[in-house]
Every structure is written in C-alpha cells, then in structure tokens.
Image (spheres, helix red, strand yellow):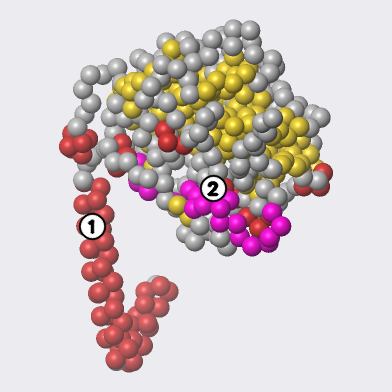
Amino acid sequence: MSRKVVRSSKFRHVFGQALKADQCYDDIRISQMTWDSNFCSVNPKFVAMIVDASGGGAFIVLPLSKTGRIDMSLPTVCGHTGPVLDIEFCPHNDNIIASGSEDCSVMIWEIPDGGLISPLKDPAVKLDGHSKRVGILSWHPTAHNVLMSAGCDNVVILWNVVHGEAVVRIDSVHTDLIYSACWNRNGSQILTSCKDKKLRVLDPRKGSVICEKDKPHEGSRPVRAVFVSDGKILTTGFSRMSERQVALWDPKNFGEPLTLQELDTSSGVLLPFFDPDTGIVYLCGKGDSSIRYFEVTDEAPYVHYLSMYSSKESQKGMGYMPKRGLEVNKCEIARFYKLHERKCEPIVMTVPRKSDLFQEDLYPDTIGPEPSVEADDWFSGKNGEPILISLKDGFVATTKNKEFKVIKSLMATTSSSLSNRQSDSAVREHRNPLPVYCVLMNLSALQNEVKELREMVEQLTQDPSRMKRKMQMDMYKICK
C-alpha cells in the first residue's frame, strides 16, 4: 500500500488572520462603482480608498495609524469631475498617488506627511490623453516618474509624469476593452489581457507585440494576468461553463499551458497578487469572502495550492502592502487591506515560527523605494534592475523622498502607429538651452554685486568716522 507524500514547503502552514476591530478603519462609504479594480492602494505611510462622492469622484488617504471610526467630515481628494476608477501609490515616493477617472483624465497628487487637513482639489499634475474613461494605472517598477495608463478607448499611454506628457501611445494593438495591464520585474515588458480574448506581451517603448496567446481561457468573462518568476505568466479566467480557472504559461512556448486548474463556479473576477520573494500568488475574488494562495515553483504541477483564508463578509476591493511595510519580527509575509461596504479590514498572512530571531529564509532582499533609472534615460532605451534592500532590522528609510517637481517641456509624443520614432538627438535639439544660459548670467551678476557690498562694508568698518558721516547723510536724505 503506497503512502501519499506531502510536498515539502516552508509556506505550507501560512495562515491569514484579520486584525481586531480597533485596528480597522470604520464608517467609510466605499465606492459602489461596478469596475474590476482594487479600489484600494497602500504603502508604509498611507492607505487610500475610493469612496462614494456626489458631484464627481473622490478618494480618501489615511495615515496607517489613523484607525477606528473615521469622521464623515474627513477631507478627501476630490479633483475629478467623474467617479474615480483606479488609484495607485508611487513605489518611489510614498507621498505621491495617481488616480484615473470616468472624466477621461489621470491626476497625480502629493499628500502631506500627516495626511490631509483640508480637501485636495488641485492636482500636482493633470494628464489628458484618453478619449474615454481611464480604469487601469500602473507605475513603472524601476524608472522614476514613469506611469502607464489604459482606458476604455483601447489605448495604453506611457507618461513622463515630471514633464506632464505622453511619450509613448500604443493605440493600434488592442481591438477591444483592455482588462488588465502590468509590468515585468524590471519594467522592460508590458503584459495585457483584452476582451478580444488575447494575451499580449509588448515592448513598451516601441509599442510592438513580442508574443501573444489567443484564448488563454475559453470563457467570455474577464481575464487577469501577471508576470511571475522567471518571466512566466499567471492568468485567471473562466471556462466555457463559467468555472473559474488559474493557469501558468511560458511565453517562449505559448501553445499549451504549463498547468490549468479549475477552482469553483463563482462569478467574481479573481485579482492576482504575486510576491516575487516567496513565490506565492494570492487570488482575491471581487464579491468573494475568501483569499486563496498558491506557491509557484519550477516542478510540476508548478502552481501548488497552499490554503485559503475565509471570512463571513464579501470583499469589494483589496489593497496589498509592499514588503517593506510588513512586521518582520512577527513572521508576517503579506498584508491585505480588505474593503467591506462600510469599512477597511487589514488581514495579515503569517508563517508560524517559534523563534523570535530574524528569519532569513522568509525575507530575502526585497525591492526598495529607490529607482534605478530616471524617466528620460528609460525612454531613451536604458533598463534598470530593481535596487534591493534588507529587512533584517525592519525597514528604515535611509534616503529622503525625492522632491516632486513638475517641469513643463515640449517633448514630442510618439505613437506606436507611427513607423519612425524620433531619434534621441532630435529630441535633444528640441530642448532649448537658453534658460540655463540665463540662469548662469543672473548668478554671475549676483556674485559681482555681493563682492562690491563686501568691499564697501570693509571700508566702512576700517574708518568709523566715515561710517558715521554716511549714516548722517542717509538720515538727512530720508528726513528731506
């Protein structure tokens, strides 16, 4: 008689636990919009949630420590004229957040350190380029101030946020509504899923298709896709019989999936969250009351079911904390912010360990907040790998957040539908060097003036009687 062998994994006993009521955020009117986005974004400083608002769209931004009942009069970010559909914090500056709305615009906001003390209506930058509502936003993982947006006009735009302009416009690839769009680990590729039942891997600067897969899932309901380890792709979708599925693909061989598993018959879209440090993917269904988690490995069947966190109330959205915001001394490997109808509830995923020492096997070096390449360099063709940090002593910010400055310029917008893109030298020719020259001239004049003043002060201090006579003359002139 053969005995079934249980697969060995340090994450086999991971368990989820909701925090106590006094550590939740209560009395928040979460948005009622029927849009399949997270509705929540979180970082080590703030948690942001899209809320119901009359006369436009709004979201609230709370310091993580501001738990308990939230006052109805709390200031909101309320600059959009239509409902907000998606929000996302910048990974390189915890005070910067982007929002996309039904009013066809993308706005960039700067949140003060202590949170809002008055309604925020004027964005730091407003990005106009979509002709229909904007429902997907994603910051570049390694390039500073590069943002991707996707709208219901079937267009993907890459923005240089500092200059406030669209640099790449991918408008001839997708023939129908874009369901999801995300970056790979170093931001050199974009992965999109579309209503035309195609999965595409794109070159973000050229806007060209590297590879694509037709019908990753047979059903007609939305498909979500994310990059996982070693460039593989994990998708969630539906079968012809409306059963929810999860599949793993190798872009080098898109013919057949490495694995395809059926989960259940619920109707909610599964939102995947992948942790590259542990290889765990968490599946959160909109309208579900559970979070499933799987371990992605190199051995068949590649996607291994671990366990499931269940609760009584369904979730309207979900926020996912970056690794640098976790409590490593409690062996916390993930933290979610579950949106209920009237509150936000943190859920902690923990690996049970007896030792209080730092667990190096659970916390390899992870992605830090420092960008590895600037926006102009990235658009010119330079890639940068993520800059990693250690969590051994708990994350401590060693560098101050880079000051967010907006620079207006006339950099040309490129489109994937154009056959020829301007070369780097042509772009440089458009940049007028005159302002820099003017600054240098002004600086030189100021230095000469300071020098003259110093000489005058020295002469007056050497001859006190002369100083006295000068003061008397000045007083005489004033009185006259």
Q: Earlier in the sequence, mark 1 or mark 2?
A: 2
The image shows a total of numbered marks equal to: 2
Q: Which residue is mark 1?
A: 440
Which mark is drawn over residue 94? Answer: 2
* Residue 317 location, quadrant: top right
Residue in view at x 49 percent, y 53 percent: 365
Within-10-Å neighbours for mark 1: few <14, some 14–19, many 20+: few
Q: Position of residue 347 (x, y in %)?
A: 71, 41
Measured from the top left, where is residue 424 in percent x and y?
Answer: 21, 36
Identity, as a three-letter code, of the amino acid under mark 2:
Asp
Residue 141: say if magenta: no
Taking depth in this image into account, of 347 and 55 the one nearest to the observer is 347
User: For numbered disc 1, what is the local secondary structure?
Assistant: helix
**Between marks 1 and 2 in the image, the one whose residue lies nearer the viewer:** 2
Going by the image, does 434 lie left or right of 4? left
Q: Nearer the viewer, residue 118 or 44?
A: 44
Q: Quadrant of the N terminus?
A: top right
